[in-house]
Amino acid sequence: MLEIIIVLLLSICYIISLIPYLRIKEKRVANNLLNISTLVFIAVYGLLLPANYYLSLLGFNSDRNISIYMDYDAIDFLVYYFAIFCVTHAFLFTIKHRKEVNLYKEKKVEEDGNNNIFNIKVTAIILFLIGVISNYLYLKAYGGYFNYLNYSGLLRSGIIIVNNKYSFIYPFRECILFSSYLFVLIFKNNKKNIFYFVLMIVSIVLSLSVLYSNKGRLGIVLYLLLVMLAMFKKKHNSFFGIKNIFKITMFATIGAILIAILGTKMGRNSDTSFIYLINNEISFAFLNFKKITDYFNINNYRFFIDIVLFPIYILPSSIWSSKLNVVTSSTINTIAWYGSAKGVNGVYGEMPIDFVSLSYMQLGYIGIIVLPIFFAILYHKLFNIPNLIKDNNISQFIKYYIIISIGIHSLFYSDPYLIIKTSFGFIIFIIIYLFINKINKRFNRRYTK
């Protein structure tokens, strides 16, 4: 009973401590990066964490997770909330003292429609072709898509039966996903174009097939959410109000239901209630910290290697894992939980690392300050990318993509390798778009002299 009261009081204090970060304009919450980030932290650690704990005590969780929660005493919760407090304030303080990022266009930008849309169209087609070719070559070693479905579950568990010489192009399949977002947006701008309508439909079907073969439920839900945003989002309000909260709650509920349905379809759910299933699914993000603090000490901290090696995860894992012996933070977290890495000693799953635990494993209580500052700077810089695109719909969508697929997703799945892996299509998009844009500008300058 004492622990429940402490968690409730700490959650209230945590929420109150974040209120000063909210920027109010005209007596309303402005739709900017700082406010959205603050509200996300409040939702996850101020509301979701105590709810997860209380529901677990009521029995809506696995015996393993409940036993870990039962090991928490009042001091453990104070230490955990102190870490959450430091991570959150380090991140938000950094965002607050950088240039304000509005999540809407303050004024209509004069668009060079032909050049900008042309660049996007070319980029989308190249992305789509890269994704399709990569998907074909990758699946070829398994005898095609339907045969691959028999292997994908084993691969997800770290069991490799087929030696696939094209395994290094696995991340390039993500290009199909990002190309589908672009085709949706291009078609939305011109609904009479049958060519892009066909590309939109084909790319969405292929994207869903890729995600289904990966056996990832959350990936499918996030993808469908982003496709719906690309299709139906028209107004980009300058304020964040009750309607926005209602829509987010509605989407979150639908997403949770889809996760449950997909889990049953993929054979990954036990015969339990819906509340049990969802509560159990998100518990890792709040229980990691206990495992990490028990496992790490001054002799085995990661000493910010996850910052230093962040760019290396763009390379094939055969280079950074096999040749350079780089071990991901998720692998370390799995060892902290089960005593062995995925695919070793009967461990057939990997435990994702959350943002607070990733920060702590760098250098203890120094890490929970330094890593969030680094992530905040990097996260803020990502919002320079949408400004390069003059088309309002595409620019706004990329902002939402960064918030959902990189920002919110990374609170729960913070391993830099996983961030790069799930954002690979976006990274390739940036590279191709900047290259096409540069070539187009040079071409135009040459013929306008």
Image: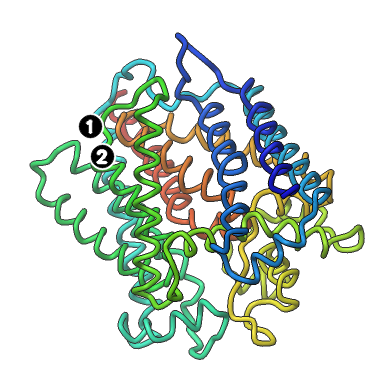
User: Relative to residue 20, is residue 126 drawn left or right?
Assistant: left
Q: Residue at image x 24%, y 29%? A: 113
Q: Residue 352's image quarter?
A: bottom right
| Color theme of the render | rainbow
Q: Is residue 442 visible?
A: no
User: Relative to residue 317, is residue 164 drawn left or right?
Assistant: left
Looking at the image, the residue that sits furthest to the top is 26
Q: Is residue 278 visible?
A: yes
Q: Which residue is mark 2?
A: 118
Query: Which of 89/281 is in front?
Result: 281
Query: Which of 323/277 is in front?
Result: 277
Q: Residue at image x 36%, y 67%? A: 262
Percent of width and height locating residue 412: 58, 53
Contact between labelled residues 1 and 2, with CB atoms less than 8 Å apart: yes
Within-10-Å neighbours for mark 1: few <14, some 14–19, many 20+: few
Label 2 amino acid? Phe
Q: Residue at image x 40%, y 78%? A: 267
Q: Which residue is mark 1?
A: 114
Q: CA distance from mark 2 to mark 1?
A: 6 Å
189 shown above or below 280: above
Percent of width and height locating residue 356: 70, 49
